[in-house]
Each structure stands twice: as C-alpha cells, then as structure tokens.
Image (tube, grey):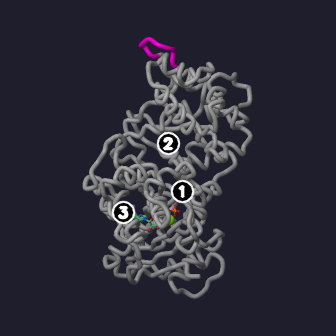
Amino acid sequence: MSVFSALESPSETTSYVGRQHELAQVRSFLSRSRLLTLTGVGGVGKSRLARRFATEVRRAFPDGVRLVDFTSICDGRSVVPTVVEAFGLPECIGDTGIDAVAKELANKQSLLVLDNCEHLVEACAKFADAALRAAPGLRILATSRETLSILGECVLPVPSLSVPPAGVTLSPAALDEYDAVRLFVDRADAMVSGFVLDDRNAAAVATLCRRLDGIPLEIEIAALRLRALSVHQIVERLPNRFQLLTTSSSVARSPLHRDARASAQWSSELCSKHERALWARLSVFPGEFDLEAGEKVGAGSGMRADDVVYYLTHLVKKSILVRIDQDSRARYWLPETFRCYGRELLSESGDEASVMLRYRDWCKSSVPPATSGGPKPIRTAVKEPVAAPTLMARPAAGTEARFVLTRRELQIAELVSQGLRDKEIGAILMIAPRTVESHVEHIRVKLGFRSRTQIAAWVSRPIKSPL
Ligand SMILES: Nc1ncnc2c1ncn2[C@@H]1O[C@H](COP(=O)(O)OP(=O)(O)OP(=O)(O)O)[C@@H](O)[C@H]1O
Ligand SMILES: [Mg+2]
C-alpha cells in the first residue's frame, strides 16, 4: 500500500470547484509561516485543497514537493518511518529517522504535505517541530481535523462550500454561482449523463446543498444516489441521513470517505469519554448556541459547568463544533451530520431524558416574554440566525429556519402539551389546522422526537421525570 507520493504529476480524477480564495490564503500563510495546518470538519476538503495547492506550486520548490498521507497509519511510532520512506531514504532505527530526514532536507527548499494527521497529532507535531528546526528551507502544509498545536503553527480553518440562501427561489443560472451547487451538478452529470440544473430541479438542488451544509464529501455521496433516485427523492430521504449518505468502498477513496457516519465516527474515536458526552448533550440544540446555553444543558451527571468550557474548547479544536463569531461573542454550532451522530450518542448514553429537560428549561428561562396577546409562549434564547451556519467565519449565505425553534413553534409546543388538538390550536392562534400540523411536524423533527406525546412531555414534565 502506497502511503506517499512525490506529486510528480497532478493526480486529480474529478473536477475541482472553487477555492480560489482559500488557495490564495494558503499561499499567503505559507509565505509568512513555515507550518500551516488546514483544519475543518470531516469531508470539507482539506486534503483536496492541500493537494491542489501542492500541485500548483510544485515548480516554486526547486527541491521538490512531497506528500505523506497518514490515513492508513495507525501508530504514532510509524510517522517518522513513513516520512523516511516518502523521501526514499534507507530505513532508520528509533529517532535516527528524524536526523536522516533533517540531513536530507538541511539545505533544500522543499514543501512537505502531511495529510490526514488528526489521529497522530502528537507524533506529527513532534516530527514537524524537529524537521522545521533542522531544515531552514522546509515548509510544511498539514491537514488535520485537529490542530498540531506547536509553536509557529498557523491554522487555516477550511470552510464549507458556499450554499444558496434559504427562503429565496433562485434561477438555475443564479444557483450556479454557489460552489456547492456547482459541485453537485458536476458529480450529477458524471452519474447521470446529461444531468442539467433546470427550473424543475433547481429548488431541490438548492435545498439539498444547504442541508448537506456545503460539505463536498456529502455532496459527492448524495450525487451517487442519482443512479436510482431523483433529486427530490434524495431530499425527501435526508431525514434518514446515515442510510442515504453511504456508498460502496470501491467508490470511496478510503473507508473514512465511505459514508457520513464513518466520517463522524472517526471524529468520535478521536474524542475522550467526556468530550463525547458533551458532544452528545450539545446535539439537542437545533441551531447555534452560546457558552451559557452550552453550560446549562451540558453540565450534569458528573460534568460541572466549569468542565463544559474545557471540553467545548476541545470539540472546537477537533473541528467537531464550529465556532461562529457574532457581535463579539462566540457562538457554536454542530454540522448536521455531527448533530445527528451526537443524537445517536445521546440516546445510547442513558442521559437523553435529563438533557432534553435541561434544554427545555433553558428554553423556558432565557428570552423575554412576547409582548403581544394570545397564549403565553415558551421563552427561548434560540435566536433566528442572521447567518446561515457556514462552517467558518465566512460571509453568510442566508438564513435557515430548520435550525431554530421559532416563537410560533414554541407557542404551539406549549399548546400541544396542554392536550389540545390541531383544530383547537388553530382556533386559538387563528391559523388553519393543517398549518398547525405542519408546525408540529417541524417541531418533532427539530427536536429529534418520534411522536407528539414526546413533544408534550418535553414541554411539561418536571426535570427529574423520564421522557
Ligand atoms: N473543492 C472541491 N471540488 C471538488 N471536489 C472536492 C472539493 N473539495 C473536496 N472535494 C471532494 O470531497 C471529498 C472529501 O474531500 P477531502 O478528502 O479533501 O476532505 P477532508 O476535509 O480532507 O476530509 P477528512 O477530514 O475526512 O480527511 C473528496 O472526494 C474530494 O475530492
Ligand atoms: Mg483529509
């Protein structure tokens, strides 16, 4: 099995979309710093970006560009021998490997790409540090879900591809401006020859790209489904995300890229028990939340509020939780695949009932009451997002209501908990029963419940009761 490549020739077999801005950023960072790490959620395109950059700049490095892919390496002790092998150096014993690489690179101008380091962070960090000290002409571009955290490291979080805003109908031509759409159409065309974005499928493609959070891996896997399904059918099946976003290993570059679950599971395996527990608890938030909210819902069963900030920082560092800076305060958000995976972890943890009730109580206590008449709504601090949850601090693509419980939904949830039927709720709120029904369905999906009864229980039960 080959774990290295000298990047002698470009090896891309599929089209590359967008990323001009990020490529320029990589160039600029690497001109100022000798170690740059590309971070970001699984499948967002870190490796592809690094390879693309390395291919583009290979002539600027007279002594070559090397790429070492650690995907199939499981043991930190194999890091140095793998790099030694990539440089074609004779096999070394113990720490002599670093000396051999250092000697090889000492007077050379070269770029070393360390790809997929997150499961070997410590060993990669140690190697990078030693190699950079020994070889002044060396630059390292690493990709890792988790930063290497060594002195001199620059970090560039790779954002998801741009997605169309929610709530606006755009023409096929206008949709083509969004990188996520362009990627889907490219892959769709390869799958179903003659696939075009037209008025009949434009809205479904836009919804799909948005609900896949603009993550290239998920977009590629979804496009594979076009063999058997229409875009509309793919969107309909998205609630069963893990069944939908899966493919055969022969198509995927590595087992990690076989499906959305494998990608989330990989991140989960890199977490400590407490980090995983917090991930599970934070998955109850249907949208963005702030630290105070995270502490309220996350603390409990042996985890103190003080611990929450500690583990939450780790989840950000491992590219599981996405940090969004708004109004000078950090907010956080779980990409949908990680959120769904977190909900699975939560239901297996035995903690689900108490966490959901803490979340409910936090909703009730955090926002000023509505000033208008009508039934008193449950209060909530979940704000309508001003920005779509792009995975990074990039300009927002639009709003996405699926991530938040609206005030109207919270009102309806309270009325459901009073045992009222859709017709009665409709009469109180002066809306059609069918509208109420659709609100109830939205609430159910957002909260990850299976039934109306669970919504009622969530609103009204005291904190200690099981759901
Ligand atoms: N800009 C892009 N244009 C086209 N395809 C892309 C782009 N970015 C990523 N891809 C494709 O998406 C898939 C996932 O990309 P990649 O392996 O780079 O993700 P990653 O962030 O490195 O994931 P991981 O954290 O699992 O290592 C790959 O098949 C890749 O070719
Ligand atoms: Mg990668």
Residue beneath disc 2: 333
Nearer to me, 103 or 223: 223
Residue 427, relative to residue 335: is it above or below?
above
User: Which quadrant of the render holds ligand 1?
Assistant: bottom left
- Give the quarter of the image for residue 77: bottom right
- Distance Cα–Cα, label 1 vs label 3: 31 Å
- Give the quarter of the image for residue 418: top right
Which of the marked residues, 1 or 3, is nearer the chain's N terminus? 1
Q: Main secondary structure of the magenta part?
A: loop
How far across and how far down the image is residue 61, in percent? Answer: 35, 77
Magenta stretch in the rendered image:
370-378
Can residue 157 be seen?
no
Q: Is mark 2 within 8 Å of ligand 1?
A: no
Nearer to me, 256 or 105: 256
Which of the marked residues, 1 or 2, is nearer the chain's N terminus? 1
Closer to the eye: label 3 or 2: 3
Residue 465, label in figure: none
How far across and how far down the image is residue 392, in percent? Answer: 41, 49
Residue beneath disc 3: 185
Residue beneath disc 1: 146
How far across and how far down the image is residue 85, in percent? Answer: 56, 83
The secondary structure type at the circle numbered 3 is: helix
Amino acid type of the residue tagged 1 in the rendering: Glu
Would you call the spot at circle 3 few (<14 residues within 10 Å), some (14-19), or many (20 or more)? many
Residue at point 61%, 85% (across, down): 91
